[in-house]
Amino acid sequence: MTPPAIRFDQVRKAYGPSIAVSGASLDIPAGQFVALVGSSGSGKSTLLKTVNRLAEPDAGRVLLAGKDVAAMALPDLRRRIGYVFQHIGLFPHIDVGRNIDIALRLAGQKPDGRVEELLDLIGLPRAFAARMPAELSGGQAQRVGVARALAAGPSIMLMDEPFGALDPVTRDSLGRAYRALHDRLGMTTIMVTHDMAEALLLADRIIVMDSGDIVADLAPAALLAGAGGDVAQALVAVPRDQAERLRALEADG
């Protein structure tokens, strides 16, 4: 039987007396797009970071295709995993092309046209390879961040509030573009987001966390139908209430 792409097996992580993740167990099959949601401090970012060992569990295991990440050399592990976060952190002193291919160069590989392929993939003109990060808009910089995360050809993508700093129009456009990219490349994606509407619209499956525990694990349609418990439904209520208020405004107009 094929093991899941990612398995969290009783993962626990504490920071001093504060428990960030409490015994989380979860299987994510290859090709799935999973959203991790919950209030601030619920443990979702910590759980995400245990995959690429930016956070080391105090107990339990994280496995990739059946292999414990704790037994893998960090460079090998992180070449298998793309990571995109809110403030993408492009190196300001090198151009876009070198920002994208830096992972390949550090691994001793030649880019050999990879930058151009990735710019095509993320929907930016190839001429952008010569631009400096300061010349990019927020959405363009985040696209470059996605390209950099894809440069080494990972099968898994971790995203921590990847579109949170963008304006609503750019955020929606980039979210749709990444979802299409995920499907096209057959990626396995875990995305942390505070935006429940974003999770409902982009993900195949939504994991709701509260005080370090997984309290719901459902498809978007099930959450919208009222399943998942009080914590999950409090999150769903926000975009639902906003939509109802907008409909009321439209009717009054």
Image (cartoon, rainbow, N blue to C red):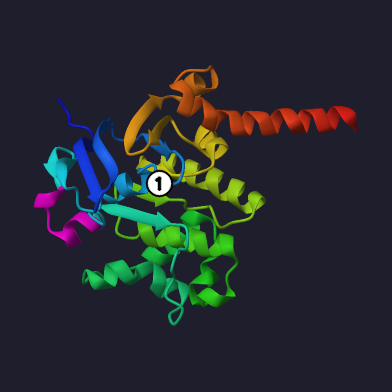
Residue 132 drawn above or below residue 12: below
Q: Main secondary structure of the magenta part?
A: helix
Residue 245 in the image, given as x and y percentages of width and height: 75, 31
Identify residue type, mark 1: Gly
Left or right: where does residue 136 sit relative to residue 26?
right
Q: Nearer the viewer, residue 197 or 31?
A: 197
User: Quick check: 211 above or below 132?
Assistant: above
Residue 166 position (above or below residue 97): above
Residue that numbered label 1 is attached to = 41
In the image: residue 90, left or right of residue 74: right
Magenta stretch, residue numbers = 69-78
Position of residue 245 in the picture relative to residue 221 (left or right): right
Q: Residue at x 53, y 36 (%)?
A: 196
* Residue 113, percent from left and from top: 38, 66
Q: Residue furthest left?
A: 71
* Residue 156 visible somewhere in the drawing: no
Q: Position of residue 111 (x, y in %)?
A: 32, 69
